[in-house]
Amino acid sequence: MLRLIFATLLSGCLPLAAAELKIAVLHPLLGDLAREIGGDRVETIDLIGPNGDPHHFEPRPEDLQKAAGAKLYLVAGMGLEGYLPKLKSVVAGKAELIEVGATLPPLAGCDGDDHEGHHHAVDPHWWHSIELFRRATGIVLEAMATAAPEDAALFRKNAAVYQKKLDALAIASRKEISRIPRDRRHLATTHAAFNYLCKDFGFVPHPVQGLNREQMPDPRELAKLVTDLKANQVAAIFPEKESNPKILSTLTHDTGIKLGDPLIADGTGGTSYIEMYRHNVAAIVKGLAP
Ligand SMILES: [Zn+2]
């Protein structure tokens, strides 16, 4: 009897069993989301790494080795991952691959040709809309609940808590941004990553580069950008934590417009989604509020 009680006490003190569900993510913010939903019941493998560029990634055999045993692969979708067909063929039959952005409403890419000569029909940076990230929570939840039905109830509870946090984030962001008068809501950024934020909060986007970090404007585009920035009395140009091309210092020198605090565009750098959003809103308000 004593031994039974002791055994029961002991088992109550033991840590929970190791994580049941292994998830490979091709975007750091999707790793954050999976951990919010799964808690210690999931193990996430971030294949791109905290400082990688989700626009450009080629899964190497050793990366895929790290993800061995993953039941789920989460990718952002909307054309962000050019390597997706290759990854799909590697993963086929072994795991479920979810393109989280596939059913979210896309915005059109603001530019035409990029310098590699192909069109970007849509802007893949959907995570800058809190509402879309909220919907993504539901999409990832369903995929996880299917992959690990025994933990589905816990996942649903955690997802509901997280969606409440996203609601609070949206309210706080709106309040902060209300300090920027409507006529000052012009967002000049490095690459064209912020169209979703601009749409949600009434900003006019002025990206220096195209939809990915390599695209550079030609002299004609640059001249038009300088004219636009001056005509709208744009108060600041925002670099990125992830990339800060030389062209920005040329631009600030030529226009006299100040450089704002760096924004986080692609969700890399090791911050959580909520930290990223708060950081960006604070930087934008600091740069543009009177
Ligand atoms: Zn990007």
Image: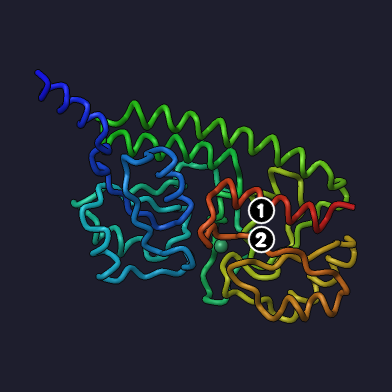
Can you say whether 130 is above or below 79 in the image? above
Residue in front for this viewpoint, 110 or 81: 81
Mark closest to the chain's N terminus, 1 or 2:
2
Q: Nearer the viewer, mark 1 or mark 2?
A: 1
Left or right, residue 67 beside residue 179 = left
Count the marks: 2
**Ligand 1 rendered quadrant:** bottom right
Q: Residues within 10 Å of mark 1 (few under 14, many from 20)?
A: some
The x, y position of residue 252, in whole percent, is 81, 75
Residue pointed to by mark 1: 279
Q: Callout 2, which amino acid?
A: Leu
Left or right, residue 165 beside residue 22 = right
Q: Identify the residue at image location x=20%, y=31%.
A: 11
Q: Identify the residue at image location x=49%, y=67%.
A: 51
Q: Identify the residue at image location x=26%, y=70%.
A: 62
Residue pointed to by mark 2: 263
Residue at the extreme top: 1
